Image: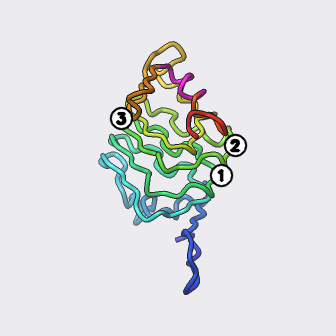
Amino acid sequence: IGAAALEPGEAGNLQIDWTIATKGDLPWNKIVNGQPLVNKAIITNIETKGNAAPLNMADWFNGYTALTTFDGSGLDTSFCSNFSNVLANNTALTSINISSWNTRGASASDRDMFAGSTALEYLILGPNVDLTGTNLNLLPGHGTDDGTWTRQDAPNDTWLGSSQGLMDRYNGPGSEGE
């Protein structure tokens, strides 16, 4: 659906181009006989596999109100130019793993991915994640003065800070993420 297959003998990643206008083509957003194929109100865990390489992820996982964990590490986002609302309005979402993602191909205005995900507690990032424009600092309990984020993977480099501080640390070339 919306993907071009590789030719025999050709190596590379599968690139998927689903735009906001055609997001109904996403298998998990399909409507069949007037009913959604996937009930977003009962999905609690999403794990991506297979290294699909989308060009546009706007609204992909928007509105999964029971979702508590999201592991997007199986996606190759190095070609993606839009992350708008990709994980928005997931009001029960506490843990996100986007450690393999590369968000640098998107402008800051196309990175507002966490809006309305008010329960967020754990965010696993990788070296190519740029949090500029994600509005992480606007989530309740994650304001500019809240010491809500702690680096857990480096025992010799402890850090506790606000969402704005985290965004400043993961903000492009030369930042903490590299």
- In what element is the residue under mark 2? loop
Q: Is residue 49 above or below residue 70?
A: below
Residue at 43% x, 24% y is: 158
Sooner in the amino-acid sequence: mark 1 or mark 3? 1
* Horizontal relation, residue 81 to residue 126: left or right: right
Residue 49 percent across, percent down from the top left? 40, 61
- Indicate the quadrant where residue 172 lies: top right
- Indicate the quadrant where residue 6 lies: bottom right
Q: Badge 3 is on which residue?
A: 94
Residue 118 percent across, percent down from the top left? 42, 29
Q: Which mark is residue 81?
A: 1
Q: For the residues labelled 2 and 1, say whether their Cβ atoms are less than 8 Å apart.
A: yes
Residue at 45% x, 26% y is: 157
* Residue toward you, 120 or 115: 120
Q: CA distance from mark 2 to mark 3?
A: 26 Å
Q: Badge 2 is on which residue?
A: 107
Residue range (magenta): 161-168
* Horizontal relation, residue 139 to residue 83: left or right: left
Rendered image coloring scheme: rainbow
Residue most extreme to the front: 156
Residue 132 percent across, percent down from the top left? 63, 34
Quadrant that contains the C terminus? top right
Is residue 32 rendered magenta in the image? no
Q: For the residues labelled 1 and 3, say whether their Cβ atoms are less than 8 Å apart.
A: no
- In what element is the residue under mark 1? loop
Amino acid type, residue under disc 2 in the picture:
Ser
Q: For the residues labelled 2 and 3, say whether their Cβ atoms are less than 8 Å apart.
A: no
Q: CA distance from mark 2 to mark 1?
A: 7 Å
- Indicate the quadrant where residue 79 lies: bottom right
